[in-house]
């Protein structure tokens, strides 16, 4: 169906109804303010230039979502509260014809695995789907190639549409459900690709057809001749189904043994090139096996799950994204009651303290070229270690016990590791200073802010000033405006920071703003500047 015919067929000129753009209580939030500014830019943009402001809007909505009072321990973001959040922020776009046209284009884009804005719209469309929207999602699934994570995600949301419309009285709902189920069943029963079969299982699971999907999966437990790697691909995509009661314990044990063997074999067979993060079949199977173990039985594999943070070969096979996902799994496990948490805490604590201690000595005992290369290589692992403590600080009180006055110097060394100083040439070079990843320096400052706020520990540094200098770099504050901001930060209750350019990635900027709030500041944001207002009783400097 042509796009203009879709528009005419859908007739989607929805009234806002009860979906408020922002509540009175949220009006003061800088996160909501950012969403409103981003949405205004989308609504003002012509179709040919709408992509960039649209992506900024999705980023703003997702960032604000983390600050909202939404269920933080929910297994996914498909519940009623999250659906209402997306509706509140995205429904206004449907009233603008060009925005609506772009949304429909997005739903038809195949293979958008790395494009969060596009996948966010797929989730949104499946929240409360119309028949026409559901058909567009199904067409997008049909357009996906066999080997893509986007097919997995789209199968899931087509399954959500099936469940939502199965008992609907909307004209065409029955026909859609039958057509979509037929498509998934064909993939499940006739497609030779294990990845496609796994995607179909995911779709059937979300459609509420667990037992039917399990029947197809069951034969892989009882028939020989399937390559172990292919079955591991299937299990990876069928992880949710494997957690249900439909699967007997013998099958679950067999599958877990396969994952354990696959992890060991893939590591042994991985080429040395993997140390330079070259994607390979072994790396993919290792990632699948590790994911399966951490989701289905983290308590059984806890020691093994921690090893990538101290074994670079394993870390390289997983990659940054999977290391971060593994950390979030460990954080969730750490929040549980009556468990021995020291093993996880000490793993991440050792990474932070080893780095801090080495940086404290670097001026007197410089790094060799090889040591510096290894230290630089581990920067993403240090990021996960620091983020672990920052993320759990407010949710697990016992996590704070590791951080006392003696740990301040360790964090200082990371914060002040902001310049590379080199002597010598070639392989004889010596490094008397190291430039640490900016994200890690900001996380270290965030920990110091939390220690000051909750434990009364003196950070022994001007946190306001240190954060300010990094913020200047992120938003390209002009020189004269930066000097004015420094004077305001030192001498008063209010500080204005001019925004010279919006960063491509808001992560560092937002973590800095969060840190100022930890220090007691109110943070207001416009398109042109940040305004920090400190309580009158608070001294100008830390």
Image (cartoon, rainbow, N blue to C red):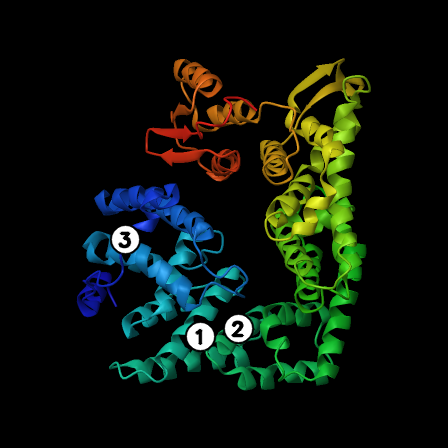
Residue 227, image quadrant: bottom right
- The residue singled out by tag 2 in the image is 202
Q: Nearer the viewer, mark 1 or mark 3?
A: 3
Q: Secondary structure at mark 1?
A: helix
Q: Is residue 171 above or below residue 421?
A: below
Label disc, if present, on residue 21 of the rendered structure: 3
In primary-sequence order, the first of circles 1 and 3 is 3
Q: Residues within 10 Å of mark 1 (few under 14, many from 20)?
A: many
**Left or right: 151 in relation to 388:** left
Which type of secondary structure does the marked residue at label 2 adopt? helix
Name of the residue lying farthest toward the front: 537
Q: CA distance from mark 2 to mark 3?
A: 34 Å
**What is the CA distance from the residue labelled 2 to the residue labelled 1?**
8 Å
Q: Which residue is mark 1?
A: 159
Q: CB of mark 2 within 8 Å of CB of mark 1? A: yes
**Residue 213's x, y, as percent?**
55, 82
First in residue order: circle 2 vs circle 1? 1
Local crowd at mark 2 within 10 Å, few (<14), some, or many (≥20)? Answer: many
């Amino acid at each position: 169906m042509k796009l203009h015919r879709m528009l005419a067929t859908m007739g989607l000129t929805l009234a806002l109804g009860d979906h408020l753009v922002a509540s009175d209580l949220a009006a003061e939030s800088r996160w909501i303010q950012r969403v409103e500014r981003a949405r205004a830019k989308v609504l003002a943009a012509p179709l040919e230039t709408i992509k960039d402001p649209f992506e900024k809007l999705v980023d703003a909505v997702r960032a604000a979502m983390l600050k909202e009072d939404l269920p933080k321990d929910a297994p996914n973001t498909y519940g009623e509260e999250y659906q209402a959040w997306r509706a509140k922020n995205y429904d206004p776009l449907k009233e603008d014809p060009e925005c609506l046209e772009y949304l429909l284009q997005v739903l038809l884009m195949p293979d958008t695995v790395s494009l969060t804005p596009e996948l966010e719209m797929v989730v949104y469309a499946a929240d409360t789907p119309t028949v026409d929207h559901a058909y567009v999602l199904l067409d997008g699934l049909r357009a996906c190639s066999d080997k893509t994570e986007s097919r997995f995600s789209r199968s899931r949301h087509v399954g959500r549409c099936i469940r939502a419309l199965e008992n609907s009285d909307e004209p065409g709902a029955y026909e859609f459900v039958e057509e979509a189920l037929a498509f998934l069943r064909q993939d499940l029963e006739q497609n030779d690709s294990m990845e496609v079969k796994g995607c179909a299982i995911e779709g059937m699971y979300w459609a509420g057809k667990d037992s039917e999907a399990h029947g197809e999966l069951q034969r892989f437990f009882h028939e020989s001749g399937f390559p172990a790697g292919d079955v591991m691909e299937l299990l990876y995509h069928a992880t949710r189904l494997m957690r249900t009661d439909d699967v007997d314990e013998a099958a679950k044990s067999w599958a877990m043994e396969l994952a354990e063997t696959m992890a060991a074999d893939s590591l042994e067979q991985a080429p040395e090139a993997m140390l330079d993060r070259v994607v390979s079949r072994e790396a993919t199977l290792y990632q699948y096996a590790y994911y399966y173990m951490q989701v289905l039985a983290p308590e059984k594999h806890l020691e093994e799950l921690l090893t990538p943070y101290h074994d670079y070969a394993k870390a390289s096979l997983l990659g940054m994204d999977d290391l971060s996902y593994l950390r979030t799994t460990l954080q969730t496990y750490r929040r549980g009651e009556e468990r021995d948490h020291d093993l996880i805490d000490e793993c991440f604590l050792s990474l932070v303290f080893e780095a801090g201690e080495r940086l404290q000595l670097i001026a007197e005992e410089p790094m060799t070229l090889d040591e510096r290369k290894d230290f630089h290589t581990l920067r993403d692992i240090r990021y996960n270690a620091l983020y672990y403590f920052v993320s759990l600080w407010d949710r697990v009180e016992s996590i704070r016990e590791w951080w006392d006055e003696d740990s301040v110097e360790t964090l200082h060394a990371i914060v002040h590791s902001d310049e590379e100083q080199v002597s010598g040439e070639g392989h004889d070079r010596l490094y008397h200073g190291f430039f640490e990843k900016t994200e890690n320096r900001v996380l270290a400052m965030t920990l110091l802010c939390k220690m000051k706020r909750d434990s009364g520990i003196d950070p022994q540094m001007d946190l306001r000033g240190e954060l300010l200098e990094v913020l200047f770099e992120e938003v390209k504050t002009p020189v004269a405006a930066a000097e004015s901001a420094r004077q305001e930060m030192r001498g008063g209750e209010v500080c204005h920071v001019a925004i010279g350019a919006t960063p491509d990635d808001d992560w560092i900027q937002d973590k800095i703003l969060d840190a100022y709030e930890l220090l007691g500041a109110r943070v207001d944001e416009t398109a042109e500047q940040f305004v920090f207002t400190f309580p009158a009783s608070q001294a100008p400097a830390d």
